Amino acid sequence: MFTDCDISSYLIFCLAAALAPQDQVEQFFKSGHTNNWAVLVCTSRFWFNYRHVANTLSVYRSVKRLGIPDSHIVLMLADDMACNSRNPKPATVFSHKNMELNVYGDDVEVDYRSYEVTVENFLRVLTGRIPPSTPRSKRLLSDDKSNILIYMTGHGGNGFLKFQDSEEITNVELADAFEQMWQKRRYNELLFIIDTCQGASMYERFYSPNIMALASSQVGEDSLSHQPDLGIGVHLMDRYTFYVLEFLEEIHPASQTNMNDLFQVCPKSLCVSTPGHRTDLFQRDPQNVLITDFFGSVRKVEITTETISLDPNLAILESRTPKDEITTEALKYAEQLPVAQIIHQKPKQKDWHPPGGFILGLWALIIMVFFKTYGIKHMKHIF
């Protein structure tokens, strides 16, 4: 005979056993997302805005390095600096003044370029309201399990960001677009980063849940440029994105670095402006949010203690090989482009060229010596 106490204990044991796998699964998928997307937008045209294109391509390069494929990246560039006639090194876009780091590369897939980068197209990408004929590469095919990174850079002011110097998107329009995304179940969590003057004004009107926002400057402040290059003739990056990129170079797919570390990458002593962030709409503690939850790709691994062989012939070969002869090489993550080393190295010595006007001055000196020596009557011998 079972007593009431025994029955209660048995029920509690069964309930705990039933909930244990669920707890393990929730711990396994801490972020709650199953896929990652990135929307990277440069809104500026013209050569003097070279740095805005470099900003966007730098973030593009970082998210690809950390595992987000091109199929999950929507890249919008308002101008093609790599093919600009004023570019002294065609097919390149550099983010450092010694021109060692080409962020354009040979595998850039630009989805929206030139005059395709408009406020309307940007909002249609976010909300999914695009024509049926739109190719897959120009669509944000996210769902309610998607973590989305949205990065924007350009010229802005209090409550707006300019597109192409001809139109602008306001903070209200952006907030309403994010609300449509939430209502249509187009994201699980969203990270919004903007590098522009008075950038914090762009996230003031957000009201949708699960949004974390970062900006390069507060209301009333300018977001300053960085890395001037005399060869190219313009600044190569903005300060905030430069230090964010330097921070991301230390991140690898298995990093445990959290969002609180990202908040500290560019203090006012470095950025001159005051970076800001907003987390009140975000449900999780930023300290528990990994950088790779947004900048990397989902890499869920199930750990098992059993040996599984996919190739029967390989299993037979391993069984014949003594365990002592099997050597395993230590695996490590290889950095594709060591920016940290490039930043601190000395620039290459450039070939010497005479300064402007040197040749003309030399000819003038020769003619003066000739006049002083022979006079005007011998001018006919020159021509």
Image: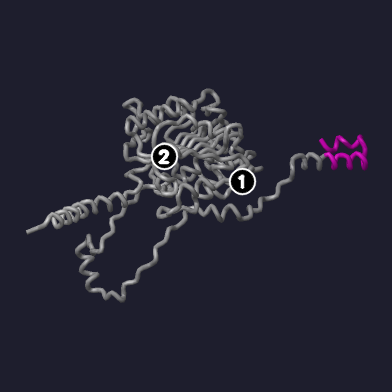
Between 172 and 283, which is closer to the camera in this rendering? Answer: 283
Q: Residue at left 31%, top 72%?
A: 326
Whether residue 73 is visible here, answered yes or no, is no
Closer to the chain start, of discs 2 and 1, is 1
- Residue labelled with disc 2: 282
Q: Please, which colouring scheme is shown?
A: one colour
SS class, disc 1: helix
Q: Characterize the local packing of mark 1: few (<14), some (14-19) or many (20 or more) Cα atoms within 10 angstroms.
A: few
Between 288 and 99, which is closer to the camera in this rendering? Answer: 288
* Number of numbered discs on residues: 2
Determine the CA span between mark 2 and mark 1. 27 Å
Between 112 and 231, which is closer to the camera in this rendering? Answer: 112
* Discs 2, 1 touching: Cβ within 8 Å: no
Q: Characterize the local packing of mark 2: few (<14), some (14-19) or many (20 or more) Cα atoms within 10 angstroms.
A: some
Outermost top residue: 166
Give the quarter of the image for residue 14: bottom left
Report if residue 375 lies within the magenta region. yes
Q: Can you say whether 145 is above or below 290 in the image?
A: above
Whole-percent x, y for residue 186 in the image: 34, 34
Q: Amino acid at mark 2?
A: Phe
- Residue labelled with disc 1: 270
Whether residue 223 is visible here, answered yes or no, is yes
Please identify the quadrant where the C terminus is shown: top right
Q: Amino acid at mark 1?
A: Leu
Question: Which secondary structure type mostly characterizes the magenta part of the structure?
Answer: helix
Is residue 323 found left or right of 205 in the rendered image?
Answer: left
Whole-percent x, y for residue 319 in the image: 22, 71
Q: Can you say whether 208 is above or below 72 in the image?
A: above
Magenta region: 364-383
Whole-percent x, y for residue 190 in the image: 41, 38
Report if residue 113 lies within the magenta region. no
